[in-house]
Image: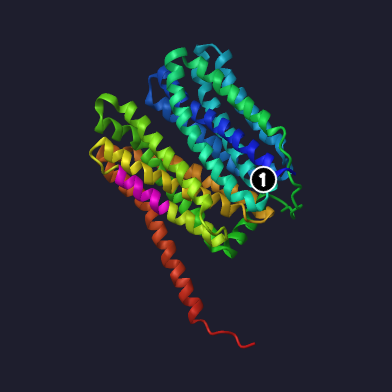
Amino acid sequence: MNSSRNTHLIITARLISDFGAFLNMVALATYVYVLSNSAISVAIFLASRVAGGILASLIGTPFYRRVSGRLPLIAFDLLRASVLGLLLILPVSQQALMLPVIAFGLGLGNSMFAIGLNSQLPNLIDSQHLLKANAWITSAASIAMVAGSLVAGLVVAAFGFEAVFALNAITYLLAALLIVPLRFRPAAAPVKPANQRGEWSALRQGLRSAPVLAAMLVVSMADTLGSAAHNVGFPIISKLLTPESASTTLGLMLVVWASGKLIGARIASRMKGSDNINLQRRFFYGVLLMSCGFIMMFQQQTLYGLLLFSLPAGLGDGFSEVGLMSRLQREPDHLRLPIFSFLTLLQMTGFGIGMLIAAPFYAWWTPGAVVLLFHGIPLGTLLLVKVLSLRRAQVRRSSPTPVP
């Protein structure tokens, strides 16, 4: 297995794949509204995409137990290209009915691809290079987000929606081609539970024996609620601060945030210490920095203040993502796949519920108050984790040392 070659292929494939994901995230949401002129249709579209991700989290573990390697990753890239191709061949009159199905297919394909790649990365890359590989993958996602968001608007304005959908389908085909040369290290054959309930039982036992991992997953879900709130609030704060150029402000804010995420990922990979405890600390401190950054962003009254605090929000995001992915990939084969499936379930449900809950608050409160409330949830969870950690340490110190 050529670890260096695999690393370059994976990073390039993720860059192209994530570029496609952000391309359709921007273009399709706009297209749904253009076709229907209905906010309810946009909500149904987004809910269908989240539902596809939730299904992926439930079926991901048994699926990848039976089918592993590069073939399923290629298949899910082809699935995403195919559902987008429907928009190029179906008449416009039928597209409105098919858009929720397309959204579901994209949500399913995106999440299944992520579960399969993240859980199998240790079988593609040597353990000593995993941290740097995760940092580059996070950096690639940041670059892809900026490029996809900007290109989507430019291509729609210049050539129309069909050109974006065609370009998007091509990105997934290119990503699939880059997966073809990957060479996987054979994974140790785990003891297979008799059914899906056995998988979740094994996961529960694994998390009980590693409470820090359970805490990381809980904090990750709490962070997803905060992320849902600030995603809803991005266009609102942009319009409040710069009514005449809200879209430009939103684009600048995303560019600065993504640049911060890229820098944070690079710093995280170069810091001394790659033990589990170091990765865990990077995750927790990253979430702390990110939530504080977003809270401060939404308190600003000027564009410059908004952009200034976008940077630490991005830095924290890069830190936390690299720490979380690298730490979870340290788990043994039989736990790694269900952990990534469970993480996807937590993130999808948290984001979906967060979007539904946060949206009405913007009608009642200021954006700063809403983001303070929802990003206060991960901050409160971090505080709770710290208190429980100190209590466990105190109990261990006060326990009598057994006599040999």
Kind of residue sitting beneath label 1: Gln
- The image quadrant of residue 385 is bottom left
**Residue picked out by circle 1:** 120
Q: Is residue 321 above or below residue 178?
A: below
Task: Name the residue at 58% across, 50% down.
Answer: 131
- Nearest the viewer among 4 and 253 is 4
State the image coordinates of residue 224 (x, y, percent, origin top left): 44, 46
Residue 266 seen anywhere in this rendered image of the structure:
yes
Which stretch appears magenta? Answer: 287-297
- The image quadrant of residue 391 is bottom left
- The number of numbered badges drawn on the structure is 1
Task: Name the residue at 65% across, 27% down.
Answer: 78
Q: Is residue 270 left or right of residue 224?
A: right
Characterize the magenta stretch by its predominant secondary structure: helix
Instruction: Give the residue furthest to the bottom.
Output: 403
State the image coordinates of residue 367 (x, y, percent, origin top left): 28, 40
Q: Is residue 365 left or right of residue 318?
A: left
- Nearest the viewer among 243 and 45 is 243
Task: Name the residue at 64% across, 87% down.
Answer: 404
Residue 356 is a magenta residue: no
Q: In terms of secondary structure, where does tag 1 sit?
A: helix
State the image coordinates of residue 143 (x, y, percent, origin top left): 49, 34
Q: Is residue 124 above or below residue 249?
A: below
- The image quadrant of residue 82 is top right
| Quarter of the rendering occupied by the N terminus | top right
Q: Is residue 378 above or below residue 262?
A: below
Give the colouring mode of the picture: rainbow
